[in-house]
Image: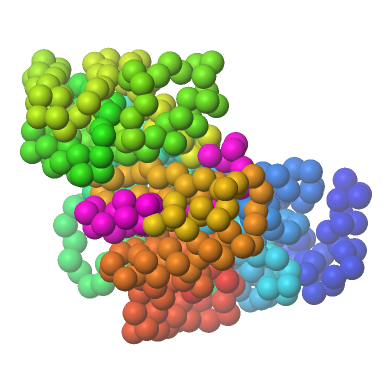
């Protein structure tokens, strides 16, 4: 332990390290709270313990140098810590499950931020406070892991309104803070639609308790919603109230191959028309992404359809009548084949088969990461124009034979993940992609970040999706709430 303390208190760069009195005071806040609530928080300062888990992100592209991680358990602890940091000009980086893809939950480097940076992790704030199984209203702490929440709700006949491949690690607070989308957006809409209220600790330490168990509330500005997509820059989300949907009685999945992007668009429209109210997901995987998933997972996965096809759609239905839903999906698939919109496919009518088919979509991000350095873009543009950017990018990348262009994503919501992979990071490749991809998106009045947020990765490109008036308003909101700029500075704005 003594070496750890040496690193913390005797670092060469005095400006960056925390004064011992600050650490003692923070520990006192936790200890004091233990005596009343029996729930002390945790202070981590062992570099071995914190570096990989908290100072690195999932993509491996962001690395922070925070020497202290705080893991409070209660809102009161968060409030006292934030108040103390605000008064002493100490920067706080809120962190949930650390699965974010834009570097938002990782401290920036010391050349950019000269004040000490503390990571405030919500890992231990993982209690479900209440669940009303008559109304489907959930209130929980923000550190609850999405998948755990879903399992708990399933036992009571409900489900979470969002699902994403990082569900085993990401937390509901992080989901709200990033405005996460995921695969059920088609059915349940954005998190805004399901949010009943939040409890947040503001940068001065005050607690905004807007937790409600009612669906309709038009009293003044909808402040909880300001925190959806705020990426930890306006305060720390400590509790979440959500309206959650009923768990479906039947879930069916189809993985369908398609020969052209025109047919992909036709198939999506056909799915909306034919499957109607039971349609719950429409996901897209291109041929190269599918081949990569197969290559890297050949021991566990068999080809879902025979031969190679340019495009695949994973279509899911959720409903209340097994027979009716199966018949609808069968009819839809038969019609798609008959009319030449689809060429082949596999249908799954039980949970195990469905989970198997989902793997071909869910494993794409992970497989790309294993294959090299990933330049990630998460754009939203009208469907008709969407594949043009992929073709354009393939053309541009021809000068870099070592780089490959992949596309996949939530096409049912007009959200494409455009990923370019090269064996290692190359500045020239990046400069060939950016700002071109953002200019292209802006020209089509699209969004340069459909669901992953801005973080540090896209901070310099925010103006491609927002006007000056909107940006100035955002800056003034930030300044009003956080005049000392202690809450996740250098992110988003
Ligand atoms: C394999 C994979 C698949 C993914 N798929 C999707 C997808 O389909 N859709 C999608 O939208 N995203 C996806 N993501 C991105 C990521 O999972 C989401 O952004 C997720 O919502 C982040 O949650 P987290 O708890 O991990 O947050 P973190 O990564 O810890 O933090 C993300 C941001 O939120 C802030 N934050 C976290 N918790 C709080 C809090 N309590 N209060 C205030 N601010 C907070 C952080 O400061 C940071 O800016 C994927 C990521 C991976 C690795």
From the viewer's perspective, is 79 left or right of 308? right
Which residue is located at x 61 percent, y 42 percent?
Answer: 372
The one of 163 and 11 positioned closer to us in this rendering: 163
Q: Would residue 292 be counted in the magenta stretch?
A: no
Which residue is located at x 57 percent, y 53 percent?
Answer: 400
Q: Would residue 377 be counted in the magenta stretch?
A: yes
From the viewer's perspective, is 58 left or right of 157? right
The one of 327 and 401 positioned closer to us in this rendering: 401
Question: Image quadrant of residue 84?
Answer: bottom right
Q: Position of residue 212 (x, y in %)?
A: 27, 54
**Is residue 115 placed above or below 134 in the rendered structure?**
below
From the viewer's perspective, is 44 left or right of 121? right
Q: Position of residue 69 (x, y in %)?
A: 68, 53
Does residue 141 show up?
no
Q: Position of residue 386 (x, y in %)?
A: 29, 54
Q: Position of residue 258 (x, y in %)?
A: 25, 33
**Is residue 38 placed above or below 222 in the rendered structure?**
above
**Is residue 351 placed above or below 172 in the rendered structure?**
above
Does residue 117 show up?
yes
From the viewer's perspective, is 296 left or right of 311? right
**Is residue 75 placed above or below 108 in the rendered structure?**
above
Which residue is located at x 84 percent, y 72 percent?
Answer: 14
Q: Considering the image in quadrants, where does the N terminus appear?
A: top right
The one of 115 and 299 positioned closer to us in this rendering: 299
Question: Image quadrant of residue 82?
Answer: bottom right
Span of residues in magenta: 368-391
Q: How many marks?
A: 0
The one of 104 and 192 positioned closer to us in this rendering: 104
């Amino acid at each position: 332990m003594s070496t750890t303390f040496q690193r913390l208190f005797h670092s060469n760069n005095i400006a960056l390290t925390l004064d011992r009195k600050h650490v003692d005071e923070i520990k006192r806040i936790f200890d004091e709270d233990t005596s009343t609530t029996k729930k002390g928080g945790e202070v981590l300062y062992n570099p071995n313990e914190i570096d990989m888990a908290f100072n690195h992100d999932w993509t491996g592209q962001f690395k922070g140098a925070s020497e202290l991680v705080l893991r409070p358990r209660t809102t009161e602890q968060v409030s006292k810590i934030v108040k103390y940091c605000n008064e002493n000009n100490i920067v706080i980086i809120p962190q949930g499950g650390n699965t974010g893809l834009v570097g938002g939950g990782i401290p920036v480097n010391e050349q950019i931020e000269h004040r000490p940076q503390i990571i405030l992790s919500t890992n231990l704030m993982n209690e479900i406070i209440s669940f009303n199984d008559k109304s489907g209203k959930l209130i929980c702490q923000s550190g609850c892991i999405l998948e755990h929440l879903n399992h708990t709700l399933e036992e009571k006949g409900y489900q979470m309104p969002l699902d994403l491949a990082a569900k085993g690690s990401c937390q509901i607070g992080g989901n709200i803070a990033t405005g996460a989308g995921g695969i059920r957006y088609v059915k349940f809409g954005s998190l805004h639609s399901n949010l009943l209220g939040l409890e947040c600790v503001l940068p001065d330490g005050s607690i905004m308790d807007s937790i409600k168990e009612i669906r309709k509330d038009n009293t003044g500005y909808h402040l909880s919603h300001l925190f959806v997509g705020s990426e930890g820059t306006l305060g720390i989300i400590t509790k979440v109230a959500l309206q959650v949907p009923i768990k479906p009685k039947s879930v069916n999945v189809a993985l369908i191959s398609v020969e052209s992007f025109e047919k992909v668009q036709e198939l999506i429209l056909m799915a909306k028309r034919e499957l109607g109210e039971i349609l719950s997901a429409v996901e897209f995987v291109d041929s190269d992404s599918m081949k990569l998933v197969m290559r890297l997972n050949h021991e566990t996965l068999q080809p879902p359809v025979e031969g190679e096809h340019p495009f695949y759609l994973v279509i899911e239905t959720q409903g209340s009548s097994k027979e009716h839903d199966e018949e609808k999906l069968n009819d839809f698939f038969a019609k798609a084949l008959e009319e030449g919109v689809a060429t082949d496919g596999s249908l799954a009518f039980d949970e195990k088969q469905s989970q198997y088919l989902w793997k071909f979509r869910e494993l794409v991000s992970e497989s790309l990461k294993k294959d090299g350095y990933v330049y990630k873009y998460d754009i939203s543009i009208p469907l008709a124009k969407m594949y043009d950017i992929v073709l354009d990018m393939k053309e541009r990348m021809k000068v870099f034979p070592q780089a490959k262009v992949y596309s996949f994503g939530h096409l049912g919501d007009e959200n494409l993940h455009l990923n370019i992979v090269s064996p290692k990071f190359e500045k020239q490749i990046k400069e060939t992609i950016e700002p071109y991809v953002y200019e292209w998106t802006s020209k089509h009045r699209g969004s340069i970040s459909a669901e992953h947020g801005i973080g540090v990765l896209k901070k310099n490109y925010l103006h491609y999706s927002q006007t000056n008036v909107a940006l100035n308003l955002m800056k003034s909101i930030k300044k009003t709430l956080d005049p000392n700029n202690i809450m996740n500075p250098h992110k988003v704005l």
